[in-house]
Amino acid sequence: MSKPLYYHSAEELVALLNKKVISSVELTRAVIERTRDVEPKIGAFISVNEADALKQAEASDKRRAEGRTLGALDGIPLSPKDVLADENQPLTCASKILKDFISPYTGTVMQRLRNAGAVIWGRLNLDEFTMGSSNETSYFKPCCNPWNTECIPGGSSGGSAAAIAAGQTILALGSDTGGSIRQPAALCGIVGLKPTYGRVSRFGLAAHASSLDQIGPMTRTVADAALVMEIIAGLDPHDSTSYNAQVPVYREALKAHAHVPKKLGILKEFFGDGLAPDIRSVVEKALRFYEKQGCELIEISLPKTTLSIPVYYVIATAEASSNLARYDGIRYTHRSTKAKDGIDLYRKSREEGFGSEVKRRIILGTYVLSSGHYDAYYLRAQKVRTLIRNDFMTAFESVDAILCPTTPNPAFRRGEKLNDPLAMYLEDIYTVPVNIAGLPGISIPCGFTTNNLPVGLQIIGKPFREEEILGIAQTFEANHPFAQQTPIL
Ligand code: GLN
């Protein structure tokens, strides 16, 4: 084998497992050992479960020896972001307030993956309560970019992106409220898909902003993202916002959608000032590739998307302030020992348990929902949200998908933007509009900057047309083997 086991795609590994060339125990050991080697430099995991993962792998090997498998991921290591509920596993959200919390139940996505035979391996690092773009606000430790460990991996799903890029796991899950899957995927040179709002159940996902959150795959290849989507997508009676639409066999559907010339919208506003020259030239090269494939590139303008960041920080903080009210020092793990009375217990536990970015958002969110400000901020933001979505839907009458950079900048140095929240918020300028409009978006590696940092291409699709953007992504991947380059660690 030319590359180490831990750098294979899940698709390749399933084939090797089926042919009995490797065992799941061997594969699981490979990611465990790789993690032991590189984790001190990366910090992708908040916790690991080596013995438990090996036990799951043994059970998988036993099943295969008996000629059966549970499902399409039998024996493949998969690591969740530490916001997904899985019974008897830690669920910290990278926060002190939940540092010793153990989940009492398994959410839908984790249950479906366990039912498909995945070996659940470790819990991945993130920005506290998924608030951030750099994975620096984790209570436990920052996570580093495998391509340059002085740099951030992106966030909030920084641990998921770094773990895939560094070969510490085979498949990962992230969650995306305003870019948290796609932005770190771009900065670490991997594939990240945010599904259409409602495509994947949120039952068991610790809520950040419920009208924007989605769980999605973070993988080495486009086909692996399709494979995970086949398992996790679909209606769930536990989530009333999950949508009742047939789930395609994505890997089959993407074959049909790959290589078909498309009408691709080039979003003018996303190629303006503020886009790093390095990113621009790499992404423009990718656009020329599509043109050579026979796609028609059509310039489109969506002027209202420029309002996305203010709209997002009103809606997301409003919802977060409400969602985070449950962490009261009584029902969850961190409880202040310095409180004088009930109200003081609530106040001190939250003061000690939450980090400063989370507090900033609770304060902002409470303000925009307060009587007297509600109409001016929250209600108005909701109205602009509708206008942004309408703009996208109008654009989709003339194009099949929209192409743009995933991020305005490549990975930046740790500490560079930590004390400048606005600069940090602007890192999501190209990803946030997709959540506001509830659309599917995928980021794929499309090249490197002159400093050898990965660049991501974002493909935004029509609602519930994940197979179409997967197909467009695969056309590029199939012709650009550099997307499979790995960092030197
Ligand atoms: N970076 C954005 C934020 O801080 C998006 C985070 C996310 O998608 N969870 O809110």
Image (cartoon, rainbow, N blue to C red):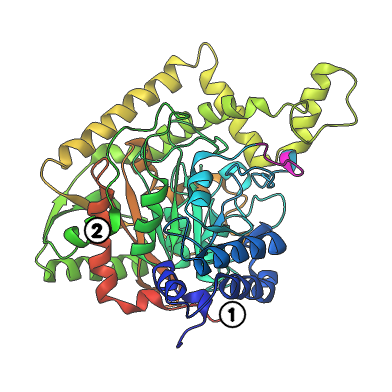
Residue plotted at (63% across, 73% down): 29
Q: Is residue 85 above or below residue 416?
A: above
Q: Is residue 263 above or below residue 486?
A: above
Disc 2 residue type (three-letter) = Glu
Disc 1 residue type (three-letter) = Leu
Outermost residue to the front:
66
Q: Categorize mark 2 by other alpha carbons within 10 Å: few (<14), some (14-19), many (20+).
A: some
In the visual, does 197 lie left or right of 159? Answer: left
Residue plotted at (52% across, 69% down): 65
In the visual, does 203 lie left or right of 100? Answer: left
Q: Is residue 406 visible?
A: no
| Residue, disc 2 | 252
User: Of callouts 1 and 2, which one flags the residue occurring earlier in the amino acid sequence?
Assistant: 2
Q: Which mark is residue 489?
A: 1
Q: Nearer the viewer, residue 440 or 409?
A: 440
Front: mark 1 or 2: 2
Which picture quadrant has residue 390? Answer: top left
Q: Categorize mark 1 by other alpha carbons within 10 Å: few (<14), some (14-19), many (20+).
A: few
Residue plotted at (41% across, 39% down): 309
Q: Nearer the viewer, residue 411 or 169?
A: 169
Q: Is residue 59 visible?
A: yes
Q: Nearer the viewer, residue 119 or 487?
A: 119
In the visual, does 189 lie left or right of 38? Answer: left
Element type where label 1 sits in the image: loop
- Percent x, y for residue 25? 60, 71
Task: Give, as a single range, the part of the protein colored magenta.
Answer: 98-104
